[in-house]
Image (cartoon, grey):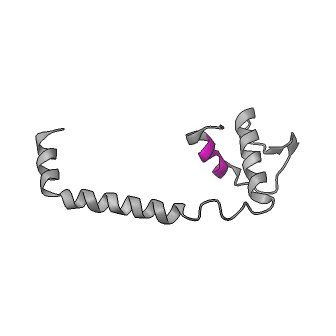
């Protein structure tokens, strides 16, 4: 670390603790009920499957579900984000 960063952090340790406490509290509050509510039947799972199939086939124009063209909703690109950043597994 730079000496200027060390000097700044030395005087602002309460800021670090506040940030740590906020992150811990947020993770506890948001994670407490994680998994209690199932997916909305069957739309959410269907939309993610369509996004996954589009990503695997590299066809980002035509949404398909089980190799059948599916144009009910055109916001499937929103489902790409978890797959792009976290992977398929």
Query: What number of labels is visible?
Result: 0
Q: Which residues lie in the magenta part?
A: 78-83
Residue 49 painted magenta? no
Question: Looking at the image, which residue is at 76% across and 46% down?
Answer: 49
Quarter of the picture holding the C terminus = top right
Q: Is residue 79 magenta?
A: yes
Q: To which quarter of the image does residue 86 belong?
A: top right
Extreme residue in the top direction:
57
- Location of residue 42 in the rendering, given as x and y in whole percent from the top left corner: 81, 59
Q: Residue at x 47, y 62 (%)?
A: 28
Check the image and report above or below for 65 versus 40: above
Magenta segment, prevailing SS (helix, strand or loop): helix
Relative horizontal placement of residue 89, taking residue 85 as reference (left or right) = right
Closer to us: 71 or 79: 79
Residue located 77% across and 57% down the image: 73
| Camera-side residue of 33 and 66 | 33
Q: In which quarter of the image is the N terminus?
A: top left
Q: Where is residue 76 in the image (x, y as percent from the top left)?
A: 70, 51
Location of residue 49 with respect to 59 vertically, above or below: below
Q: In which quarter of the image is residue 40?
A: bottom right
Q: Where is residue 51 in the image (x, y as percent from the top left)?
A: 72, 45
């Amino acid at each position: 670390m730079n000496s200027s960063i060390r000097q700044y952090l030395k005087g602002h340790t309460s800021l670090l603790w506040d940030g740590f406490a906020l992150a811990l509290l947020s993770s506890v509050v948001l994670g407490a009920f994680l998994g209690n509510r199932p997916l909305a039947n069957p739309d959410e799972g269907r939309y993610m499957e369509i996004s996954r199939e589009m990503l695997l086939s590299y066809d980002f124009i035509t949404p398909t579900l089980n190799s059948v063209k599916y144009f009910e909703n055109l916001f499937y690109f929103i489902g790409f984000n978890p797959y792009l950043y976290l992977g398929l597994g």
